[in-house]
Amino acid sequence: MKHWPISASLHKTDSNIELKATDLASFEIILYNDDVNTFDHVIDCLMKYCKHDAQQAEQCALLVHTKGKCAVKSGDYSTLQPLCEALCENGLSAQIEMV
């Protein structure tokens, strides 16, 4: 996958279509460790909202616990935004970052 620089823009002059860098950029949901949520709750949320299978969710939860954070989902911003909101609404500490 080609990563475009932040300042990149594509213009198609004959149809007035403009793609901005944020449309082309890749983003990740970063999940952060906390002292509140149980492993089971984190795993359940990752399976429900990020569509992880049980093994992937468990591995991410373990990485969050040992490393302090883990990228749990990647994609475009508009896809990740409602997933990140759902994680946060369920008490997890997460944010979207540009890759």
Image: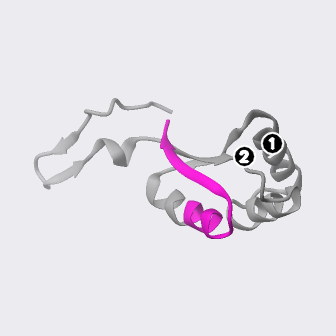
Counting from the top left corner in percent of width and height, residue 82 is at 53, 66
- Going by the picture, which residue comes out furthest to the front? 35
Is 83 situated left or right of 98 in this image?
Answer: right
Occupied quadrant, residue 85: bottom right
Is 89 situated left or right of 53 in this image?
Answer: left
Residue occupying the point 80% across, 42% down: 65
Q: Please, what is the three-letter code of the amino acid marked with disc 1? A: His
The answer to the question of whether label 2 and label 1 lie on touching residues, with beta carbons closer than 8 A, is: yes
Counting from the top left corner in percent of width and height, residue 30 is at 61, 45
Residue occupying the point 85% across, 59% down: 38
Answer few, some or many: residues within 10 Å of disc 2's Cα (few below 14, many 20 plus, some between 14 and 19).
many
Occupied quadrant, residue 46: bottom right
Q: Report the span colored magenta.
A: 83-99
* In-front residue for pair 87/57: 87
The numbered disc on residue 96 is none
| Dot 1: element | helix
First in sequence: mark 2 vs mark 1: 2
Residue at the spot of label 2: 33
The numbered disc on residue 65 is 1
Is 61 situated left or right of 97 in this image?
Answer: right
Q: Please, what is the three-letter code of the amino acid marked with disc 2? A: Asn
* In-front residue for pair 19/80: 80
Q: Is residue 86 magenta?
A: yes
| Dot 2: element | loop
* In-front residue for pair 2/71: 71
Q: CA distance from mark 2 to mark 1?
A: 6 Å
Answer few, some or many: residues within 10 Å of disc 1's Cα (few below 14, many 20 plus, some between 14 and 19).
some
Residue occupying the point 75% across, 33% down: 67
Counting from the top left corner in percent of width and height, residue 41 is at 82, 64
